[in-house]
Image: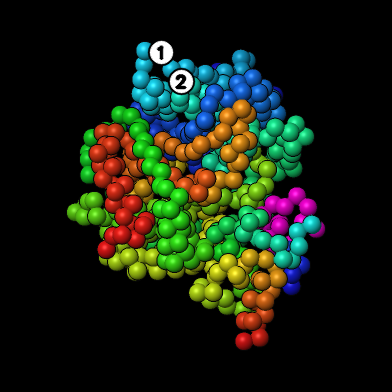
Amino acid sequence: MKKKLRDFIFQELVFIADPAQFSDDDDLLEAGLDSMGIMRLIMFIENEYGVTLPDTEIEPDNVQSFNALEQWILRHQNG
Amino acid sequence: MSIKKEDILEKLNPADSFTLAMDEEIRKDGLAGNYGCFALVLSNIPDIEALQQRITEFSQRFPVSQASLRQIGRRFYWCKRNDPPTLFFQHHCPDNQNEADFQQQTLDRIINHKQTREISAPIEFHLLTGPKQHTFFIRWMHPFGDARGADLILKYLCTADDVQRQQFGLPETGSLVNVQLGKYRWWQKIGLLLKGKRYIDQLDRLESIQPFNSDLPPQRMNYTIKRLSEAQTEQVIKLARQHVGLTGTSLYYIGCLMRALEKMHPDNAGEAYCAPYAFNLRKQRALTPMTGNHVCALFAQVPRDAVQDRQKLFAHLKQQNAQVIRQQMDYAFLPLMWAGSWLSLTEYGKILRQSHGSGKERSSFWFSDVGRLDIPADSFPGAEIKAVFYACQVTTPPALAFLSCIYRNQLTLSYNFNEPVGNSEQIDKLHQLMLAELLGEAE
């Protein structure tokens, strides 16, 4: 799951000179993921994983890193 | 005059043509044209030699910056010139002039400077100096680039390391609009085009409210800059997060401006406020592309009754934005822009901005939020960057463009308006109403 998220974010939304150096805990918001990017990321996740992510949960804690994103998606997949 | 094929440097992409249609309209009104401006307030006179050297290097690496815009048939191209234009100008305040007046009058003159498209340089750099006030000012023709591109050019000038400067503009991507269009098969493009058209038709069911109620023709563009304190900025960001969430700071500014305008002129005709805003196709933090427009348009539209209720307004804007992206409307205007670039500028301008329903102006105001600028304050050659602001020309109607950015934790608001359609007194009143809305102090 994280590989697909990484591919989407680094190919479509944020430029990182060396993506391999960007860890799953590194801060995506600090790296430049902006409001429009978050919206497009959420649409990608909903299409790709068949989940609905509630607007009320779009918070820094859930989108801050790849690990946080994965946990957020898994909570809804399992729910 | 005939143009040789080898003199053509670049063809305008569909987003460049989109800005050119507006340039045509602004020029027809007798104003300078569709120019964008970016100003840096500096602590002292910078290292002029270093600055000049980087500007020269920039113009050599990106030759479109010295090109002339020429029309061949219905299409427009950046072409080589025999004599490259001057790109760097210095203006020093005379001893006998008030410094603040000098700064304001000089910027005003640069912004409103009229030249034909063929003669006008795609980009100009101006340094205004005096005993205490120093401003570095960039003015660019919109078909040459967008605000994010201007930000990149500034970063280029602020990068001291030669090797790091070489990274700018790489890898060469060409037009991102064309790259995105190239991802679709022809039938998908038609599908998107129809989707975009249906979306516009739906917007046009409501007549847009205009910000001013004057029939006077525009004579010049003016601007007012208002900078919020760090504490005020923090409060605005907190409220934006509360009302529209992490995905919509720009929507908060749009909503607040709609409410401020409604309070200023509650009797102005129309049924809804409608604001176009650009969605940039560049990746965040990417150092490329440096030139060209890589944007697609989206709209925020709110019926008058919803504007009057703060909670209802932000819920509406948030839901509309989510829906637009869910329906992949963020790319729906690309085929429309591509098709539009084959029309004459006048025809394209009408389709771009006039409502099919009423034949009146679709935009209540132009809007652009550059967000948080990450240019280090100590990176400008030989001077500290104290503050920044943007400015731009705008068509009449709507005769009002609102631009925002955050630098050094301070939100800067730029109100751009065409006089005498609007005037400074009205803008001051509008800002007071806007400030109350942004800070959550209005009912």
* Figure coloring: rainbow
- Residue B31 in the image, given as x and y percentages of width and height: 37, 29
**Residue A72 among magenta residues:** no
Mark on residue B131? 2
Q: At 39% from the left edge and 34% from the top edge, which residue is drawn?
A: B26
> Label 1 sits on what residue type?
Asp
**Furthest-left residue in view?**
B267
Q: In terms of depth relative to the viewer, which is nearer, B328 or B364?
A: B364
Name the dominant secondary structure of the magenta segment.
helix
Q: Can residue B182 be seen in this view?
A: no
Q: Position of residue B67 (x, y in %)?
A: 60, 25
Q: In which quarter of the image is the N terminus of chain B?
A: top right
Amino acid of disc 2:
Pro
Left or right placement of residue B330 versus residue B171 in this view: left
Q: Is residue B435 left or right of residue B10?
A: left
* Residue B416 in which image quadrant: top left
Residue name at image x 63 percent, y 76 percent:
A72
Residue range in magenta is A7-20
Of the pair B9 and B90, the residue shown nearer to us: B90
Q: Which of B146 and B28 is in front in this view?
A: B146
Task: Give the percent coordinates (x, y) of residue B408.
Answer: 52, 45
Q: Is residue A16 above or below residue B27?
A: below
How far is disc 2 from disc 1 in space, using C-alphas? Answer: 9 Å
**Disc 2 element:** loop
Q: Where is mark 1, residue-wise?
A: B95
Question: Which chain does tag 1 point to?
Answer: B
Q: Residue at the spot x=56%, y=21% of the render?
A: B88
